[in-house]
Amino acid sequence: MKNIQKLGLLILAVIGLIACEQDDDFMFTAQEPSTEISFTNTFLESYILTTATSSNIGERFTWNSANYGVPTVVTYKLEKSIIGDFTDAEIVGETTGNEIAVTIGKLLTYATEIGLDNDPNTANPDTGLVYFRLNASVGTDALQITSPIQALSLYLPEQSTSGGLAISSWGIVGSGYNDWGKFADAKFYTTATAGVIVSYVNLLTGEIKFRENNTWGSDLGDANLDGILDSDAENNIPVTAGDYKITINTNDMSYSIEPFSWGIVGSGFNNWGNTPGVIDAKFYYDYTTDTFKTSVKLFDGFIKFRPLNTWSGDMGDANLDGILDTDSDNNIAVTEGHYLITLNLKDNSYTIEPTTVMGITGSGYNNWGQDTWNHDGDASTPEVKVSDAALTEIQPGVWYAENINLLDGLIKFRPNNNWGGDYGDLAPLDNILDQEAENNIPTVAGNYVISIDFNDPSGPKYYLGKRN
């Protein structure tokens, strides 16, 4: 009987203990969150949107975890707004994790909602803002908190409009440019004068010829160097390293080769040309606008425009009216950032516009952006990281750079010297840029011509033309 009583007391004690534990469990309820949430990824100054890259990730939103005081499942909802006040809020994605990726195709849809287009003949803008925020909650949207609003600037590159100018069928080939055709010949462009074509090109010391459509059979040189092209034997044209303007008059086959380049110099770029190994930021020709352009990372300081990396014929803007002049005290003040600078040599007008700059980084160039230098030449000021090798958007969606010295190593392409939106090429290499893991691009030391074509229907196609 006593054993039965003891057993009964034991059962009651166990039941009581279980009840207490259940009560304790019930006391663990979610509380008002003790932390705010915010985006932790780095955003770009501008997001370049093309249909060829619509399947690529435009932005990967990441954030810190909300803390509700107890272990609990938190639901995160990414919302977008066209208006900006989120009265038109639309849920982009929902997760219990800490990231949501948004494709370029989705951003293109938002660009259409904003009213953007890339037709230069319409009044619609090609740049606009779309707004994002993040909501965190538990259960059925209980104890909801919201992140600060983040605006993304969307940009649709304009459709090509050449104004009558076009890419010529003629090109430059040789040891002085592409090692006799190992990659595409340097392009010529038509001009306002019928039969006259022009090329703005960086050459190596060597020899060149001119040929049509990147093929042998119609190639021309100059056997006796009299300025008239011929098809004689031994007619290669010797050249020395440098930047040139080459003009051919196809009406009489006369030609000229003259030194030519314009660049950006100043305390806002390369310590007025005194930084060893850093030449002026070179302008590249854009036949669609008949202007010269350069994409560049600038620092707080001053800049000027000058030809051939020399102090002869340099120009600034004394009264800041957008027209270059040779007046005294005509340095142009700039602030740190990434810019597209356009120069019109027909009237010496220029523009400096904030933009996204595609660049090259890696062990094959600037130690993955970790190398440093004194851009202002002052040893007492902190060194800054060496900028990526900038490419310039010479035509809508087409980025280009030449005379780029790479090392044995690996590279990737990324915007504005930042990670997020970077591109590589997953092995086996197919020359189509992607955003997969382990997609670094191997390089062999040498001098390169490099380009990216975001208009290619197969995806953003890149070219690494090794010249020596």
Image: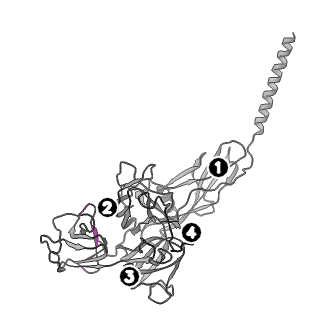
Per the image, the residue denoted by label 4 is 382
* Label 4: how many Cα within 10 Å (few below 14, some 14–19, many 20+): few
Q: In the rendered structure, which amino acid carries the disc numbered 1?
A: Ser
Labels 4 and 2 touching (C-beta < 8 A): no
* Label 2: how many Cα within 10 Å (few below 14, some 14–19, many 20+): many
Q: Which of marks 1 and 2 is nearer the N terminus?
A: 1
Q: In the rendered structure, which amino acid carries the disc numbered 4?
A: Pro
Labels 1 and 2 touching (C-beta < 8 A): no
Q: For this view, does 188 lie left or right of residue 281?
A: left
Mark 1 vs mark 4, CA separation in Å: 35 Å
Labels 1 and 4 touching (C-beta < 8 A): no
Label 3, secondary structure: give it.
loop
Mark 1 vs mark 2, CA separation in Å: 47 Å
Q: In the rendered structure, which amino acid carries the disc numbered 2?
A: Lys
The residue positioned farthest toward the top in the image shown: 1
Label 2, secondary structure: give it.
strand
Q: Which of marks 4 and 2 is nearer the N terminus?
A: 4
What is the x, y in percent for residue 6? Answer: 85, 15
* Label 1: how many Cα within 10 Å (few below 14, some 14–19, many 20+): some
Residue 65 circle label: 1
Q: Which colour scheme is used?
A: one colour
Residue 442 within the magenta-colored segment of the rendering: no
Per the image, the residue denoted by label 2 is 466
Residue 345 circle label: 3
- The residue sitting at 37% across, 67% down in the picture is 401
Label 1, secondary structure: give it.
loop
Residue 187 within the magenta-colored segment of the rendering: yes
Q: In the rendered structure, which amino acid carries the disc numbered 3?
A: Leu
Mark 2 vs mark 3, CA separation in Å: 31 Å
